[in-house]
Image: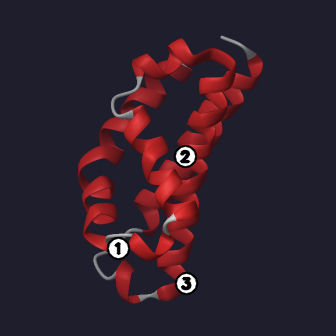
Amino acid sequence: MRPETRQSLTDAKAAAEEVTTLATPSWQEDRTKALAIERLLMIVGEAFVRIRSSEEGMLEQITDAYKIIGMRNVLVHGYDALDPARVQDAIEQSLPKLNRELDGLLS
């Protein structure tokens, strides 16, 4: 694994873990917390964009890596079309698995 790939995976893992910590049941009602969660999700997606550029085969080992990049694109470019329910679903359904997969890749 290239050093820049490892760094991107580490960055994605740290951001995903922080989302998990911040995503309390009422996170959507707290604008500051919602913005922080959105920013952290952008970091995860951007880390995967960088991995795609440096070592794309690594993304094949991450479930929904390209969907995560797609969410990053919506967060950055289509913020007005963002569906909070979709973000909540990603947090509840995808982040636990993503964290496990990133742990495995980094170990």
Residue in the picture at 47% in, 59% down:
74
Task: Identify the element where label 1 is drawn.
Answer: loop
Task: Identify the element where label 3 is drawn.
Answer: helix
Residue 36 position in % (x across, y down): 56, 71
Earlier residue among tags 2 and 1 = 1
Left or right of 7 on screen, residue 44: left
Q: Which residue is mark 1?
A: 24
Label 3 is placed on what type of residue? Thr
Residue in the picture at 58% in, 61% down:
76
Left or right of 45 on screen, residue 63: left
Residue 54 position in % (x across, y down): 69, 20
Label 2 is placed on what type of residue? Val
Q: Which residue is mark 3?
A: 32
Earlier residue among tags 1 and 3 = 1
Q: Is residue 99 visible?
A: no
Q: Is residue 87 visible?
A: yes
